[in-house]
Image (cartoon, helix red, strand yellow):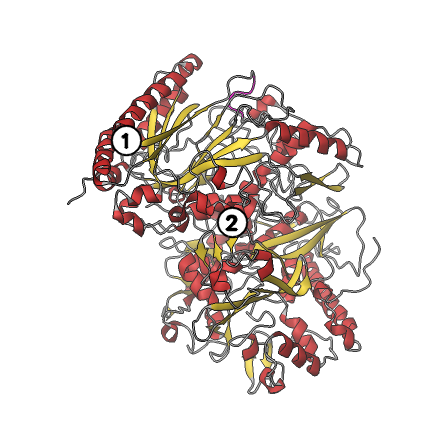
Amino acid sequence: MTAKPAPIWPEEPVLDMADIQGIAVPGFFKPYQTLLGVRYTRAPQPIDALKQFLRKLAPDIATAAATLRDRRQHRGATPAAKRAPRSPPLIAIGFSYQGLLGLTPGASEIPSLAFKNGLARRSALLGDPTDPADPGNPVNWKVGQPNKELDILIIIAGNGRAGVARRAHTIERALAGIKAHVIRQDGNVRDDVPGQKGHEHFGFDDGVSQPGIRGRATARATDFITERHIDRSEFPAAALFGYPGQDLVWPGEFVIGYPQTGPDPLIPGPVLAPQPSWTRNGSFLVYRRLRQDVGLFWRTMRAEAARLARLPGFANLDDVELAAKLVGRRLSGAPVNRTPAGDDPALGGDQLANNHFRFDSDTPQLTLVGGKDGFPPAKADPIGSVCPLAAHIRKVNTRDSPSDTGGRSSTYERRILRVGVPFGPSATDRYAVSRSHGPDRGLLFLSIQSSIEEQFEFLQARWMNDDSRPKSPSGNDMVVGQNAPTADGVRRCSIFGSGLQQSAVEATGQFVIPTGGGYFFVPAIGALVSVIAASSPR
Amino acid sequence: MGLLRAYEPPAYMSDFDSIPGQREAWHRFVLESFDLNIQLVAGKLQKLDPSRPATPQFYSAVRSDPPGPLVEQAVVWNAFPKELLRRYGRDRALVEADWLWPLSAYGYNWRYDPGVPADTGAGTPGDIYPDTYLYQPAVEYCQWHIDRNPHSGRIRRVTFTSEPPEYWQAMFGGTLKYSRVRFPGDKKLLLHLYRKLVDPNIALSDLLVAEPFLSPYGKLKKGDYNPHNKWNTTHGIVHLSAPPNAIRAEINLAAVATVLYEDQLNNPVVDPDAFIAGTDMGGPNRNSDPTIAATVNALARAGAMVTLANPVGLYMDHIDVTGWEIPGGLAPRDCVRIVRGEERLIERLVVELPTDEFDVSDIRIGGVPVIYGGQLAECITVKLVGVAAALGSVHNGRLKLSTAGYVDPANAREVYPGERYEIPVGSVPAFIYESGEVVTNASRGRRSRVTSPGGPVR
């Protein structure tokens, strides 16, 4: 009998929690947000006034330390306390390249070409429509269209709509006072349909799978930014995950100046060097205003399910089952791999269980801290017979599977922290045809990463839009992928029937339409004060 | 389904049709490689239980026809060499990937520094391959050649290939290293195709070995076909010639990856990175080999029989032109030509603008001008096509991991395979979370192989 070797636990760095913005670490996950898009005038006096405004705002920007404190208080609170909007809203700020360059010439040294080109210029690379007549083309965007790109994005996030609105109004007034142009966009967690709180507009629980940022808030050995819920007797799972299935990712994937992913997930990779030096503790923020055509999505699911149900191996397939397969999760957030027979809302709502599954191997049971996972474990599904290889969750996170870019480390390198919220009212009839002047609804997609090219853009362009990557035979991401990159404007993917029959699902229409956004740099608070908002010598 | 009658040439290419006996020889050559690898796998499995015959989970569709539905599994990977990305980061990797390295550098592995080749690589005593022949360090089964305007230096054309070297060696005729199959060959056809694909002025002597040398393809004698000839390296490209880029490497990897492994604590080894590093299969820092091995192994763990689909080959699946901006009203599709192979089974692909007014350097991807061939390679997906059959039908035991990979914690960029190569000072066993104890043992056994850049530690 071989003796069990002693586990070697990775030493995680202490992050500069007083300098990093809280939207980046640990991330705002607030149900109510207001985004203020700002365009300022390029002239000495307005710029001086703007810098003065920024210096005044800087103490109100939520630090990583304050945001983590808020989160810990929130998670420790009673259900009643959670509902009470007592903690003040959290504020974050980001600058587009042009917005930053107007305030500090050092912005030109930032190496990211995606950041410098901006979202509208990179839109075609993301698979957005290139036809100017298409509503998703940048010229038709509601915010951030060519020549009207935002300079600054201010995010106000909180537990209550009223508190967020008040704080946003104060900032708007201050910006109006310095003659800056402001575009306001409110985003709210969906709370107008019973049982769907926290779900995106198609109806699926969202944000179930977020990466866990490795790192400590203080020098204390166990003061981890990401909570650990696996018993330390479970090595290596306890070293690899926060919640079961929540990958712990080295902080350099989200914040500049820290170790990134290396070949071995327990050994920190090279430090992402800041360039220029004041970008240390900064991040990049992607904002995409995505309109969702709920009616088209569900009508397509209904029609495709009805067509497939007539084929051998697909009997009784309905729209909800088909949609769940294409997402990879059921409406409740329960992973299809753990619920092959149908939804289990209890599993979907259980953070100790809803992200604990692998694709290529059977998923082991784990000893957990603060509870247990009593649900049936996921079985290996390497060919995608249960959860198709084109399912959205397999497109954006390959978990234990290899991909077109190699082994498991290649998925850690692509992870992003999603901190957005839905906007617009819920659809009352999910099959209804949307009216051209009807209510606008969708997602204010916000993601945090240290490289726009290698993370957000890679996921959208290389994995979601492509019909064979990251694993094949798969197809396009039918939920979020864009039609423009396909040869004939039709998204397709392959799913299995009960007897391993393979059949294609098709979508001619676009369920998700880009309607604006921008690429932003989220500076460290120190850099905001001492570099970006510093008075310019004349 | 019934048995497969014969393996056809890659992408159903018809060059061999005009050579009597050549297609049959190609079939026998591919089948020989399958048979040898099935024997190899059987030999490994025999160690588990010498008393009974093993059931290799790798099979040839010519030899057997497993029951039940067949599930085709294309294994895809990106064409841009990840080894360079890991070692140098993207900016430098784009430069290196367009250059050629001396063949000696391949044997010198991570210690070769293209920045100071005289000190750390080429010409170092003990290297097995010569400096005088070159290869592109693009080891993802896809290589390219750039044609530039000699006056401006701008890129006129980039030619990509995934054609295996064995196909062209076979066209020359004779036998290949490790094979008993004799190809009739046709040197005139070989020359004709070189002239058609690269330059009409090529002479047959340009393609032949002038002086004997040791190559990854064996000891090449005077008058042999030289896969490293200048029209396939410095002056053009016809087929793959970087040492690991070969069809038999593909068959071998697909075969040996069907073997299941466990660590010293009897836990199955399932992590793709730990698996390839701990089993010494292929390159752990590539896009291709870890995903090929891990995909096949996952099918084997699911109890499947696994094979490679006919025609066995290495292919470019597609080139993604999303976000390409081309002047002159040209669409991206106007600038991409499949020259050999077919859609989804592409063997040779050319990117070139059909006008004298603009050239490839005028293409922008996401607003960024193309100045390296590697930027186009980043858009290319390479693949092989596997087939899984009779899922759940085989339940083989697991072998113990045989070796280990190492990582330098001070610069954790790449994995050093402990079995084959010397490793940098200070490196530690990698993937201990999945292979801990065996790695500790391997580390003890391999201590003498640890070296510093520039040579072994005395």
Q: Do discs 1 and 2 belong to a common subunit? A: no
> Left of B36 or right of it: where is A335?
left
Q: Is residue A222 in the magenta section?
A: no
Q: Position of residue B190 (x, y in %)?
A: 67, 79
Q: Residues within 10 Å of mark 2 (few under 14, many from 20)?
A: many
> Left of A67 or right of it: where is A445?
right
In the displayed structure, B88 sits above or below A345; it is: below
Which quadrant does the C terminus of chain B fall into?
bottom left
| Residue sitting farthest toward the right | B2
Q: Chain of mark 1?
A: A
Q: Residues within 10 Å of mark 1 (few under 14, many from 20)?
A: some
Residue B239 picture quarter: bottom right
Q: Amino acid at mark 1?
A: Lys
Q: Which residue is mark 2?
A: B435
Q: Which residue is mark 1?
A: A179
- Give the structural element (helix, strand or loop) at label 2: helix
Residue B77 picture quarter: bottom right
- Give the structural element (helix, strand or loop) at label 1: loop
Residue A494 picture quarter: top right
Q: Amino acid at mark 2?
A: Ser
Q: CA distance from mark 1 to mark 2?
A: 62 Å
Residue drawn where x is 84% and y is 55% of the image: B2
Q: Position of residue A260 (x, y in %)?
A: 40, 47
- State the predominant SS element of the stretch in magenta: loop
| Residue A321 at least partly seen | no
* Residues rendered magenta in the picture: A195-199
Q: Position of residue B27 (x, y in %)?
A: 76, 68
| Residue B216 at least partly seen | yes
Residue sitting nearer the eye, A323 or B399? A323
